[in-house]
Image (cartoon, rainbow, N blue to C red):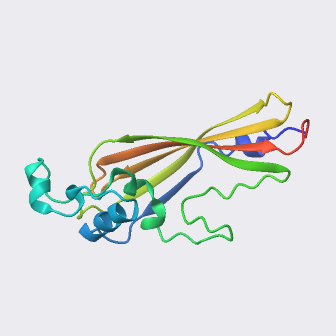
Amino acid sequence: MTLLTDEIRALVGRKKVYTAPEEFGAAAGRYFGIAIGDHNPLYSDPEYARAQGLPGVTAPPTLICETNQYADLPIPPDGYAGHEWGIEIPGTRKVRGGNSYTFHRRLRPDDVVTATWEITDVTGKTTRSGSEMLIIASRATYTDQNGGLLAENEETIIFVALEAGK
């Protein structure tokens, strides 16, 4: 059995698009900063933000990558409220392989964000212990209401067979 099937290969190019229903607003950045313990005055003090060359308050950079903040996604039984592809492979364990972020511009309160996710690659490998492994790479591109690039997120999800040779 192989985890890298024709059905899995066909996922390359699959897209999901989420657009926020409204502008982010100043409170979203302020609240997110508080929630993650980042009390940078860029998120709460408009005068301070302007003195730093910004048009006003902004948000912690990673807020834009938290699609659960604005995409109105359903919450599955495991409680994860962010973007998922819905890929389930019986007999495997799913592991987040990591993320790599590139930020192009800070989020402003008047931004309406669109996140466009695309599966960019699928690769089959074998672990040192002989278990099959499937790596699914995807990219999210975050744009503002004018199509301006805000950020990108490269992400990998790894499925590892629970038994070697399965």
Tell me which residue sits at (81%, 49%) in the image.
Answer: 92
Q: Position of residue 76 (x, y in %)?
A: 65, 70
Q: Nearer the viewer, residue 14 or 57?
A: 57
**Quarter of the image where the N terminus is located:** top right
Q: Nearer the viewer, residue 150 or 53?
A: 53
Among the 4 quarters of the image, the one containing residue 87:
bottom right
Q: Is residue 133 above or below residue 93?
A: above
Q: Position of residue 81 (x, y in %)?
A: 55, 66
Q: Is residue 103 above or below residue 108?
A: above
Q: Is residue 79 left or right of residue 140?
A: right
Q: Nearer the viewer, residue 109 or 87?
A: 109
Q: Position of residue 132 (x, y in %)?
A: 82, 36
Looking at the image, how many numbered discs can be counted on the residues? Answer: 0
Q: Is residue 131 left or right of residue 109?
A: right
Q: Is residue 154 left or right of residue 147?
A: right
Tell me which residue sits at (8%, 51%) in the image.
Answer: 51
Tell me which residue sits at (51%, 51%) in the image.
Answer: 117
Among the 4 quarters of the image, the one containing residue 115:
bottom left
Q: Nearer the viewer, residue 100 or 121?
A: 100
Q: Is residue 123 above or below residue 34?
A: above
Q: Residue lying furthest top in this view? A: 128
**Quarter of the image where the C terminus is located:** top right
Tell me which residue sits at (37%, 71%) in the image.
Answer: 21
